[in-house]
Image (spheres, rainbow, N blue to C red):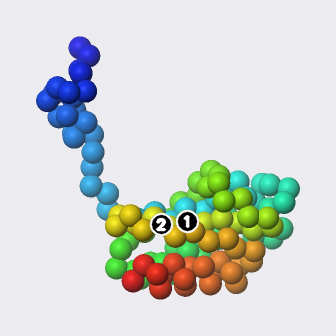
């Protein structure tokens, strides 16, 4: 049986699929940056994820740190990362080294307090 978008039944079906997540935001690290020929030479997405996870765990909002496909920022010789929280706030950074990844995590943390 096909449900029309205007019917009450379709709303019930859509509502029954939605769940409340256990986190209030997402930190995304581009996994494509390390594969590009003009990407970072020594920085890996896995290392950036670990840094973000370690530095952002104390925030009042719980973040899920994930590796994703291209974020569309594509910085030269760098890796892109972005944080989105439930309030709608979006922050992005580009990192050339692990030191800059730690600095970006500190900046994210300061901005989200």
Of the two numbered discs 2 and 1 on the same chain, state the one appearing first in sequence.
Answer: 1
Q: Where does residue 60 sit, x and y in percent of width and height?
A: 34, 79
Q: Which residue is mark 1?
A: 82
Asked if the residue under mark 1 is in contact with the one under mark 2, i.e. CB atoms within 8 Å, the reply is yes
Q: Which residue is mark 2?
A: 90
Q: Is residue 23 left or right of residue 98?
A: left
Question: Which numbered disc, 2 or 1, marks the residue closer to the eye?
Answer: 2
Crowdedness near tag 2: few (<14), some (14–19) or many (≥20) residues, C-alpha within 10 Å: some
- Quadrant (top left/top right/bottom left/bottom right) for the C terminus: bottom left
Q: Is residue 31 left or right of residue 109?
A: right
Work out whether residue 63 or residue 80 is closer to the camera in this orientation and state it. 80
Crowdedness near tag 1: few (<14), some (14–19) or many (≥20) residues, C-alpha within 10 Å: some
Residue in view at x 38 percent, y 71 percent: 62
Q: Secondary structure at mark 2?
A: strand
Residue in view at x 35 percent, y 74 percent: 61
Work out whether residue 22 or residue 9 is closer to the camera in this orientation and state it. 9
Q: Where does residue 64 sit, x and y in percent of width and height?
A: 45, 64
Q: Is residue 56 above or below residue 25?
A: below
Q: Is residue 106 above or below residue 65?
A: below
Residue in view at x 75 percent, y 60 percent: 34
């Amino acid at each position: 049986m096909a449900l029309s978008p205007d019917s009450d039944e379709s709303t019930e079906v859509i509502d029954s699929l939605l769940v409340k997540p256990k986190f209030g935001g997402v930190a995304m690290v581009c996994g494509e940056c390390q594969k590009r020929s003009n990407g970072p030479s020594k920085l890996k997405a896995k290392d950036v994820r670990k840094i973000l996870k370690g530095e952002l765990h104390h925030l009042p909002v719980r973040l899920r740190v994930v590796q994703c496909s291209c974020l569309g920022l594509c910085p030269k010789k760098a890796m892109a990362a972005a944080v989105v929280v439930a309030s709608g706030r979006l922050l992005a950074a580009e990192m050339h080294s692990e030191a800059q990844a730690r600095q970006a995590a500190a900046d994210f943390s300061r901005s989200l307090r």
